[in-house]
Amino acid sequence: MSDAASVSGHSTNKAGRFVYVSGVVLLCAWVLIPLYLLLVNTLSSPEAVNSFPKSFLPGFDLGSLEFFAGFSGMLVALKNSIIVAAITMVLSILIGAPAGYALSRFEFRGKEVFRLLILLTRAFPLPLLALPLAVLFIRTGLDDTAFGLALVHTTLAVPFAVLITFSLFSGIPLELEEAAWTLGCTRLTAFTKVVLPLILPGITASAIFAFVISWNEVFAAAVLTIENRTLTAFLLQTLSESPLHLKFAGGFILVVPALVFIFAVRKYLFAMWGIANR
Amino acid sequence: MNARVLPYVLIAPVTLFLCVFFLYPFFLVAQQAFTTGNGFTMDNFREVVSYWKFPISLRNTFLLALAVVPVQLALSLLMATMVNNMKRGRDLVLYVWTIPLGISDLAAGIIWLAIFEQSGFLNSMLYGLGVVDQPASFLSYQNMTVVFIAIMLAEIWRATAIMLVIIVAGIGLIPKEYYEAAEVFGASPWKRFVKITLPLLRPSLQTALILRVVLAFEVFAVVAALGGSIFPVLMEQIYENQFNLQNGGTAAALALIVLAISISFTLVILRALRVPKGATI
Amino acid sequence: MSFKTKLAGAMTGVAVLTSAVAVQAEVLFWSTQARPAEEAQAMRVEVLGGFGPGVDYQPNEAGPWLTRFKAEIEAGSGSIGVLGSLHGDFSSLDADTLMDLDGLGVMSSSETFNNLAKLGTDSMQYVPWMQASYIMAANKEALQYLPEGANIDALSYDELIQWTANVHEAVGQPKFGFPAGPKGLKHRFFQGYLYPSYTNGVVRTFASPEAVTAWEKFKELWAHTNPASTNYNFLQEQLLSGDAWIVFDHTSRLAQAFNERPDDFVAFPAPAGPTGRGFMPVLAGVAIPETAPDKDAAMALVKYLLKPETQLATLRATSFFPVVDVDLPDDLPPAVRAAGDAVAKMSASPDANPGLLPAGLGSKGGDFNRVFVDTFERIVLAGQPIDRVLADQKRALAKIMDDTGAPCWAPDAPSDGACPVE
């Protein structure tokens, strides 16, 4: 389906085009307006945050942000957050994608059980698991390391990686791979040359999920890191009771890095070599 | 490598990983649900189920999932087709639509509370437009419908992007020839969507739905921010048992109940949207 | 495969790198208090900056706080040096997991607090660290509606209800604010204020005829309460935003309002009922877990925290008052002055009826609070008949008292054995 232009008749075309564009604009506004309001509150003075009726324009008061600039430990925590998120991303794709491929290509005994196991991990609240995990970590020396925390975050992110790659591999015709085999590729080279480029969007989506899951996770981070606190554990613990203007500013600071990351990888979400446009 | 062994080799790393970091702690916690100090018992389950707030939180959790997930599914399908048809600026539009992904549920709660609270943005707007002469109290136990709608909007805003990203990644794999052929035969856009997009998107739809439904049963932070203490949900009861009442047994029992609900829904979705082994041309 | 091995190698490298930093001599102070960003910062800089060996002050929500502590105990080794939390949190812990602190030579100047800190054992399990209370506060706008002849420093519940009704009528909106949100301390109002003021008890009198009156009165007050109160956790926010004009809350949960706009608000004592002016303290303590890595340093930190200078710095940072005898200087922050005055007036009032913190409930402290919260939600929010709800909840309360065998505490008359629900 190429464009609304394909609909026959000039007037329907124009009307369709109008509905289409206004739909896009409306949906963008729906997403952006709440975020804009967060920005307004972040950039307002404490008095303005508490005033009524509220102004819909920011006051460009940087006081709240400056407070966090002087908040000790922020930069170290930011670094820790990025390290943990990066390890989580690599780990979850590295161990998740092969499993996604196996699920889509093979019938094997225990497949259903395996799928349920994958889902179980998302259907059980992490704060309950944190206690036995913390005991395990303290005993094995993984406690208070970025790597240890990344392991826990990977448990949260890996179901996304497995299931997303599974659904994408399932969308790629088996014949495509088989054709490559007959052309002299081994299973591995057929995979890397033919299939892998096609599921780049899926890998990207998995990476995004892994990053934001790790970035926003607070409970395990609060329990399992001390010297190496992540930014979320460091800030979010204090935010819910902070005065409003700091609450908004802190929330804003937490949102920005995740947005930068999604922005950086956004274009890989699209199939670059769609099966048809050879 | 042998095709009989290969799948097991491929799933070995993740299985091993989950055994250590999920199954091991999971069994320790699950065990607590069946003990109160002396041997096997179902007392914990009886206790949590007979608590007066249990039916209310169960109902609230279901209602919310029922109200939110279908809307999100429709919305994400709409957004995905829109963005897929776009010629220019599509990665920018998609970026905007995925922004809520990066926002934690706690932060989302803060943002939406700032909108709906009495001296919040919504009242400021209504007041400025002269619709109300003094700020209305939206989030009160006297009009639960409004509270429910507020929570619904916030959840739709926050979590639609999860489905959108999965569906966008999947929609790109549908061969363009199918659409071109359909156009030649004069199929309307709606017909093309129903006859081509939906069936071929089944794997991604399944994944998106399962993940979203599972997460919907664990909804908590946004509900706590907007619903306060008048809209109890299951997850809130779990935290209450674990941390306020410090009863690991009853908390684990509740968590197992949520788990059972999630699994049964997952099985239903799996049956309804069965995925064939590899698509065929 | 070689790529994977390389990557695994790189990852271990990262792990080693990141863990190598963790060589520490600082004492880890694992606390549930002073969580707000500004207070945490003030604790680190103003209060703990003067402690020689250095302190890593980590404020946490109760969930992670407890989970981490339990994990360290279970693992048999840990990094927490000093625990800081409320009396209620400590009393739910197993006393064997905390060091006996009798030998330390520091304690609070209140015999009552020191006894509470024994947690039912023979020796101090934690050291009282700081105290606070719950008070009332109002926007000065509301003062013009005070009922005729009412003295704001000696209000009765009836006068309070009349006052909130006057405000309601005058501005067209209910302006009483009550901390009924998920994190709000509503249960303390019932346990320490409403019940003692109407029934001169908490447990014994839970379902008494006087208790029925108390709940009827509270329902009257609720009619003039902002219905969004079920979202309110820290009333300073609603004072500042103007959503509430007259409020009840923990002194440190009102502090922000007084510090930001000291001229706009007044603090005053809680109201009195037929059996006096009930009120209750908040007590925070510091303890040392048996698994502390450096017990000497931890003990030194506890001693440091109890020094008069440190207690004063803590007061400035957190609005929590000292537990040792200290002369308060004149240049305290506005919130501290306002709260201090209100508490002093409350305790000095002729009809004062001070209550104690629940003691002896062990891990059932949460269940005890839940009895009161449930009673509130059923009577006030769900509109169920008072006597039926009280009869129902009475059984839950009696079971908790029987299971724990906790004796009565003030203002309930003393009991032999478990405190009976009459």
Image (tube, helix red, strand yellow):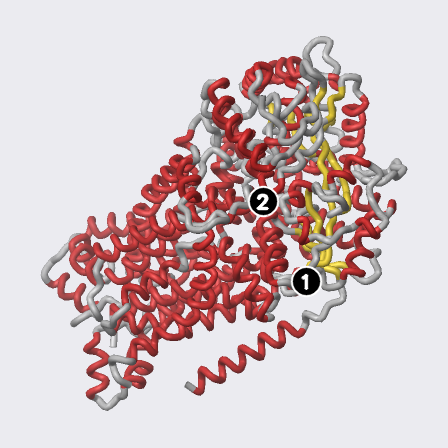
Give the residue type at disc 1: Ser
Give the crowd class for mark 1: few <14, some 14-19, many >=20 residues within 10 Å.
many
Q: Residue furthest bottom?
A: A184
Q: Where is mark 2, residue-wise?
A: A41
Q: Is residue A29 visible?
A: no
Name the chain letter of the residue that bears numbered label 1.
Answer: C
Q: Nearer the viewer, mark 1 or mark 2?
A: 1
- Residue A236 place in picture, x, y as percent: 59, 52
- Residue A228 place in picture, x, y as percent: 63, 65
Q: Quadrant of the C terminus of chain B?
A: bottom left
Q: Where is mark 1, residue-wise?
A: C79
Query: In front: A143, or C244?
Result: A143
Q: Is residue B202 left or right of residue C96?
A: left
Q: CA distance from mark 1 to mark 2?
A: 38 Å
Q: Secondary structure at mark 1?
A: loop
Give the crowd class for mark 2: few <14, some 14-19, many >=20 residues within 10 Å.
many
- Residue C70 place in picture, x, y as percent: 60, 55
Give the residue type at disc 2: Asn
Above or below — where is A220 with respect to A108?
above
Name the chain letter of the residue that bears numbered label 2.
Answer: A
Q: Is residue C417 left or right of residue C122?
A: left
Q: Secondary structure at mark 2?
A: helix
- Residue at mark 1 shares a chain with residue at mark 2: no
Q: Is residue B120 visible?
A: yes
Above or below — where is A241 with respect to B161?
above
